[in-house]
Image: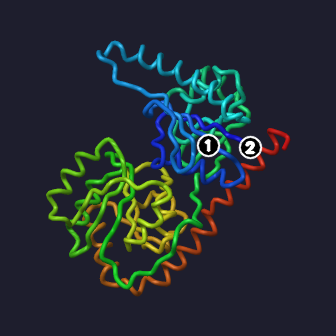
Amino acid sequence: MRILVATTYTIPAYSGGWTTPLDLFGDQHQAMYVVRNFKAGIHTIENVKCVGVGSSQAPWPHAERFRNAYFQLRFQKTLKQQFSIFNADFILCLDPNAGYAAMGTGLPYAMRFHSPLGKEGATAQYAQLVKNSVFTTACPATNIPDMEVLAHNQDLSRFNYFESPSAERAILLTSINSFREPELFIEGIMLSKKIKGDIVGTGVDRDKIASICSTTGDRVRCLPPVSRLKVPELLNNYQIGVATVKKVPVHYQMKVNGYMASGLFTVTKPWTHIAIEAPGLVRTFTTARELADQLDYLSDNWLETTEIRRKARDWINKHYSIDVPRKRFNEILSEKFDL
């Protein structure tokens, strides 16, 4: 099928809203993106056509709602135009704002909620959004009751398992913001005996974190973000993968799937999904001191972790393969579009 993906905040090539739908579609479907908050114009990214609607800051605070209304109308108009140009079968919307724009076109659309709902989940408008959609699914950690969950797994076949003879460097592959706790990672690296670390990603706190890293004497670096297709190559430069996040109920962190598939030993918070589902395959921490202790343990006992890392690779490939949600996604399409 030809699927037009509508999304508000996705960063093409980098964010989960770009990676997971494309991995979900695989070679069976053709995709095109319309991204509201992306530079205006037509772009080709990873051989995928992407149309940015564009946005700008309002010149004065009271103009914000008018700016939003204007760009929402542009979003809706662009979806209608590109649906025709692409000859799409339906629009797959990744957030309510994209859904409202698609609903306004009168064209067939489906919802794949890619992030938690706010207060809009209790409104009559939201109920209408779901009712009018061809189908609705949720991703892990979106916390939407009574909605089928399709995991946003990566295509793990892209990742190359690699065994390093020693552990010297850790990575935090992340959205750089306070919720993901990059400063905790920095502190843990600095408290460890000799492990070095890199933070890789985009985010609102990137400049702040880069400034802090510049004071660590190269122990911790803040590196440029890496696009979806280059992440597997990136991970083979590391031995330890770290997943930090503030305490919430069970939290799905997609990065750990790539870590484990690549042969990195994964160190996470206890509430990250993998620590609950496969506790014997990871080590956990809650404080910077505990993170440092785990890093030092792995550095001192690296070769003894070989068997666990191999088991982790096999476990993640079995339980988090893209084949699992892809099969169900195609079943839904067959049911809803009479394929």
Give the x, y percent position of residue 87: 71, 34
Name the mark nearer the viewer: 1 or 2. 2
- Please rate how many residues cluster around mark 1, counting C-alpha atoms within 10 Å: few if below 14, some from 14 to 19, many from 20: many
> What residue is rendered at 31% in x and 80% in y?
299
> Is residue 203 rendered to the left or right of residue 83?
left
Report whether residue 183 is seen.
Answer: yes
Please, what is the three-letter code of the amino acid marked with disc 2?
A: Met
Quadrant of the snapshot with the N terminus? top right
Residue 106, by quadrant, is top right
> Is residue 330 rendered to the left or right of residue 200?
right
Q: Which mark is residue 1?
A: 2
Judge by depth and name the residue closer to the eye, 220 or 249: 220
Question: Compared with residue 222, is residue 95 higher up or lower down, i.e. above or below?
Answer: above
Residue 122, by quadrant, is top right
> What residue is rendered at 40% in x and 60% in y?
243
Judge by depth and name the residue closer to the eye, 315 or 237: 237
Residue under pointer 1: 138
Report whether residue 118 is seen.
Answer: no
> What residue is rendered at 70% in x and 25% in y?
107
Colouring chosen for the image of the structure: rainbow
Give the x, y percent position of residue 217: 15, 64
Question: Compared with residue 2, is residue 120 higher up or lower down, i.e. above or below?
Answer: above
- Please rate how many residues cluster around mark 2, counting C-alpha atoms within 10 Å: few if below 14, some from 14 to 19, many from 20: some
